[in-house]
Image: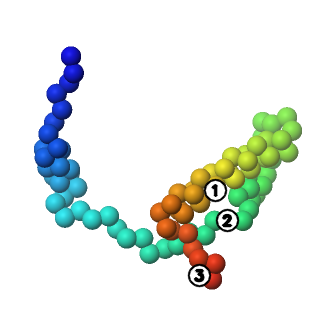
Amino acid sequence: MSKRRRPAASRRLAEQKFWGATYQPAESTTSIRPTTDPGVLVRSLGGPPLAMDPAVSIRHLTAVYEEAVRAATALAAANGLLAEDGED
């Protein structure tokens, strides 16, 4: 047996009660400029304390940070938040 769904009107009413009737998302005025060296944070902390070979651990952590920067850059580009080349 399927569940009964709440009508869309009552869902909107619940959203208005939670967020307020005049909720408007804030406009972002800042632009995002991706970093050129995502691994700098990992290197600044030094070698991992429990690693057999710190260079391998740092390489893996840097790869994770690089992938995070790629994902964040893609999200920023999709939302029009990337800084232009001449923009500071």
Distance between the Cα atoms at labels 1 and 2? 8 Å
Q: Which residue is mark 1?
A: 69
Residue 21, quarter of picture: bottom left
Quadrant of image for the C terminus = bottom right
Quadrant of image for the N terminus = top left
Residue 5, quarter of picture: top left
User: Residue at left 85%, top 34%?
Assistant: 52
**64 or 53, nearer to the observer:** 64
Provide the secondary structure element on which disc 2 rests. loop
Distance between the Cα atoms at labels 3 and 1? 20 Å
Within-10-Å neighbours for mark 3: few <14, some 14–19, many 20+: few
Q: Which residue is mark 2?
A: 35
User: Residue at left 23%, top 62%?
Assistant: 23
Provide the secondary structure element on which disc 1 rests. helix
Provide the secondary structure element on which disc 3 rests. loop
Foreground label between 2 and 3: 3
Name the amino acid, label 2: Thr
Q: Position of residue 66 (x, y in %)?
A: 69, 53
Instruction: Mark yes or no: residue 28 visible.
Output: yes
**77 or 54, nearer to the observer:** 77
Within-10-Å neighbours for mark 2: few <14, some 14–19, many 20+: few
Name the amino acid, label 3: Glu
Q: Position of residue 18 (x, y in %)?
A: 20, 51
Q: Which residue is mark 3?
A: 87
- Is residue 84 toward the left or the right of residue 35 in the image? left
- Is residue 62 toward the left or the right of residue 75 in the image? right
- The answer to the question of whether label 1 and label 2 lie on touching residues, with beta carbons closer than 8 A, is yes
- Which of the two discs, 1 and 2, labels the residue nearer the N terminus? 2
